[in-house]
Every structure is written in C-alpha cells, then in structure tokens.
Amino acid sequence: MDLDAVTSYRRATTREDLLLAPGEVPLAGGTWLFSEQVPEITGLVDLQGMGWPDLVEGDGGLEIAATCTIARLVAYSRTSMHSAAHLFDDAANALLASFKIWNTATVGGNIAKSYAAAAMTSMAVALDAEAVIWTPDGGERLCPVAKIPAGNGASTLAPGEILRAIRIPAHALASRVALRKEALAENGRSGAVVTGRVDPDGSAVFAVTASVLTPRVLRFAGLPDAAELAASVDAQDGWYTDPLGSADWRRGVSVVLAERVRRELL
C-alpha cells in the first residue's frame, strides 16, 4: 500500500456517512487507489458497507451497483438471457487486468477514474447507460456515462459526488452488440476500442473509446454502409498520443475496428 498519508478509515453504512471530509475519498475495490502514491489523500470511506445489491433487473432494464465487482458482472453475463449481456464479458477481457483483479475491481471505480481505456466505460457507453450520481446535498442526478469522462483520468464528477449505480435500458440489453479492441502490445492496455449495437427497431449506435480522450457516440437510423461509417469515425476529434500509440495510429485503427464491428453486425 502506497497511501502513506492516510490517517483515517471508516466504513460507510448510511448516506450521511458519505459526506466526505477534506482529504477523504470513497473506496470501492481500491485496485487503482492502492497502486500509487497520492499524498493528498488522508482518509478512506469504504463504500462496501452500504450493502448495495450488485445487480437489479426490472422492466426498465438492468441496474449495476457501482460497487459490483467485474467478476460478478462477468458471471452474470454468462447466464443472462439478454442478447447484449456478452458485452460485459468482452469488455472485461479488454481490461489491462487479470481475472484475479476482477474479483476486487468494481464497475463504478473503473468508470469514475475516467481513463480513456476504461473498459467498463466502453461497455456502458455502448449500451447508452446512465449513471446515478448521489450529490452531497442529499439529492441525486442522472448523467449519461459517456459524459462522465472529461479527459484521460479527469472526471466531470463534482467534489463529494458518489457514483451510485449504472442503469442500462431494456432496449439496449435486447440489441445485437459487438466489441473490437487493438493494442500495440498483445496483452497491453487498449489503444483503441470500438463497439457497435443494432437495436430491435433497426437503429445503430457505434461508440469509439480508448483512442479518444472522451467517448464518441455515433448514431444512425440503420446500419451504415462501410463508407459512411468510416467517414463518421475518421471525422471525430480527441485522438491523442502517448507511449502506447500515436493519434494518427489510433484514428486509423479505429476506422478499421469499426468496419470489423459493422461486418459482424450485418
């Protein structure tokens, strides 16, 4: 553990416990939190004591608790009758993390960190998921998951806000979906991820993540042809360069991945 500035730990069991003091941060799985030094963090507030049910199915769709582990979501995907549920497994396998990490890492934590390559963000954006966010004043607001990342590792969540759950609408769960990823290293962090979805009404949604600083969502009345899709992906902005890929490479690879997804959905 590298959090050598931490002097307090408490387990939240009520909403009032989620009011954060200066220096406190929420703790879910902690797989990132304990991975590097963060000297400004002086206290941890454990969300696991809230007892949120991992998965709640209803007529409106599926609610995934922010504290649901990736392993639990993957297990659900392998028994679910929803046609889009396999995307949970596909996204988990796009993570730079072993199946052992899945048992601790949480869906909400992966999304809230807002890294460009966050695979749970790719999954949620692909399915038009909405985030349930608890505000410090005791209220609640809803936000498309696609709007949570503000940059690579930067979030639009305000200080004191807690990501409570992710809601996936029923029509998205009933859709046909596909995910393709690419990385410079065989088992490395995703350099580009493209997801595609065809809803029961025939409309299509493609999402570009990992290769751009914030998710890009492309909507079509029906499945586009190859030229239209390639032009739409290529026209996006926000491509970035880091040691794991140049902006031009990310753009070009995303166009290729989008066409692979499109062909699978034909």
Image (cartoon, rainbow, N blue to C red):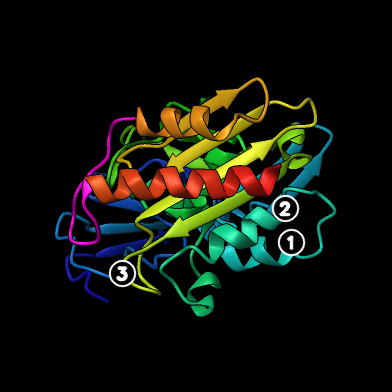
In reply to whether residue 242 is colored magenta, the answer given is yes
Front in this rendered view, residue 198 or 56: 198
120 up-or-down from 31: above or below: above
Nearest the viewer among 220 and 91 is 220
Which residues lie in the magenta part? 236-247
Residue at horizontal 80 percent and vertical 31 percent from the top = 200
- Whichever of labels 2 and 3 marks the residue nearer the N terminus, that label is 3
Q: CA distance from mark 1 to mark 3?
A: 27 Å
Query: At which x and y percent is residue 113?
Result: 36, 50
Q: CA distance from mark 2 to mark 3?
A: 30 Å
Q: Earlier in the sequence, mark 1 or mark 2?
A: 1
Residue displayed at 21% across by 52% down: 246
Q: Which residue matches tag 1?
A: 76
**Tag 2 and tag 3, C-beta contact below 8 Å:** no
Secondary structure mostly seen in the magenta stretch: loop
Q: Nearer the viewer, residue 36 or 186?
A: 186
Q: Residue furthest front?
A: 227
Question: In the picture, which quadrant includes the N terminus?
Answer: bottom left
- Is residue 234 part of the magenta span, yes or no? no
Give me the disc on residue 34: 3
- In-front residue for pair 216/129: 216
**Element marked by disc 3:** loop
The amino acid at mark 3 is Phe
Which kind of residue does numbered mark 1 sit on?
Tyr
Q: Which residue is mark 2?
A: 85
